[in-house]
Amino acid sequence: MKNKLGLLPLVAATFFMVSGGPYGIEGLVQQLGYRGAVAILLVIPVIWALPTGLMVGELAAAIPAEGGFYVWVRRALGPFWGFQEAWLSLAASVFDLAAYPAIFVLSLGQLWPGALHNPYRVLIPAVVILGCVAWNMLGAKAVGSGSIVLGLLLLAPFGLMVALAPHREIPKTFVHPNWYAGLVLAMWNFMGWDNASTVAQEVKDPQRTYPRTMFWSVAAVALVYIVPILAVGYSGVPSSSWSDGAWVSLAGGIRPWLAVPVLLTIMVSVVGQVNSLTMSYSRVPMAMAEDHLAPSILSRVSANGVPWCALLLCGAIWTMALSMSLERILLMDILLYGASLILEFVALVVLRIREPELVRPFRIPGGTIGAVAIATVPCLLLVLAAVLNRNEKIGSIGAATLAGGVAISGVLIYPLVKKLCAS
């Protein structure tokens, strides 16, 4: 039990898997104004994050297995759909973890412009990813404990912003609200709760720890988004001053010396996100290998329980993907992640029907109808986001087309993988 994750380390790791701080929500204020941004940040946790957290709480407590969401879907729907769940999640990880280090470089470039040019703009992101792979080799507890430290470093400058911001009336600037864009942005900033499930065998008392983790993580992420926005609003800054990456200038507007600490915490945030997501995603290939849906070598673990072969493979893929010319956009993440999330909600309902006697230490109230009700709104939001933003493109290719191609690829390669990896 000494080397397992307790409640606080798992909450901290989940915080980074989902959020990593208030970076990324600047566009909400720009699109919706202060009142609109706060309103959607109050609503989305209730109709999007909380249902997902409840689903994760029930399934992770009932089936605390390494591989988490992959195992749930495989158990409920069979190996074919389990493979598709893993395929979609790992494909989304390529877009995520090839992009976060780029944010690190852009932030570092504000202090050292040379970081934005070759060879550093590729070498530095590679060092970030490989450094997090090395950190993960120390085990899940090292990642969770490190997340606590990184979280404290991340939140300290924002705590100072809140404490030092002058108290004035929030400016009543007129904004034409773009609710479509705001919906996608808010959903993206509250995604990833299921990523915590993949390390269940490395968590102390997972039956009790996961439901509590979901509750505290949802509350923490919502507060970290809302409180700094209100602090800046009450300092008299108009919503027109907000744009992507505006936290540095906003902090400097409150106190000039606050700009540098906030800039540095962007890099802290990226390291925390990459580190926690590396821990999460690396357990999925291991679980697939144990089910003969991936090469058996990926099931090898070190003495401290780390799936070192799967970890090295994921790190290598993410590092090679750093040269991709594809631009990371919110819709692409939502389409890939959203498709896998829908499968998880289907698994929740199917398991309620097929395995009513399954011991569920935490249970969503309302029986099967309650499970369906919990699943309905998030699934409808995912469909709505895809429909309203169907014309978004990555380069010359529609994001929906690209995501569809990724999904179809998983269907096509499944028979080959099953044949090659069969024992």
Image: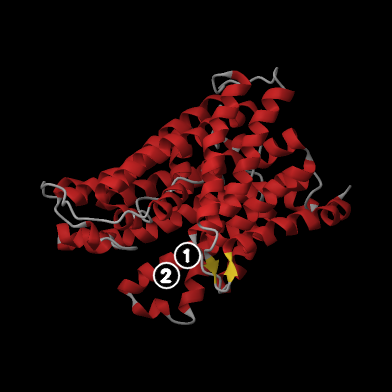
- Disc 2 marks which amino acid? Val
User: Is 192 situated above or below 2?
Assistant: below
Q: Position of residue 233 (x, y in %)?
A: 20, 50
From the viewer's perspective, is 126 left or right of 352?
left
Q: Is residue 324 above or below residue 418?
A: below
Q: Nearer the viewer, residue 313 or 339?
A: 339
Which quadrant would the N terminus be assigned to in this image? top right
Task: Give the percent coordinates (x, y) of residue 245.
Answer: 33, 63
Q: Nearer the viewer, residue 124 or 294?
A: 294
- Tell me the distance, in whole angstroms, between the alpha carbons under discs 1 and 2: 6 Å
| Residue at screen point 27% across, 60% down | 242
Instruction: Look at the image and tell me whether residue 300 can be seen.
Output: no
Residue occupying image coordinates x 69% and y 19%? 356
Percent x, y of residue 389:
51, 57
Q: Which residue is mark 2?
A: 105
**Of helix, strand and loop, which one carries label 1?**
helix
**Nearest to the observer: residue 3 or residue 157:** 157
Name the amino acid, label 1: Pro
Q: Residues within 10 Å of mark 2 (few under 14, many from 20)?
A: many
- Whether residue 247 is visible, yes or no, is yes
Residue with the mark numbered 1: 101
Q: Mark 2: which secondary structure?
A: helix
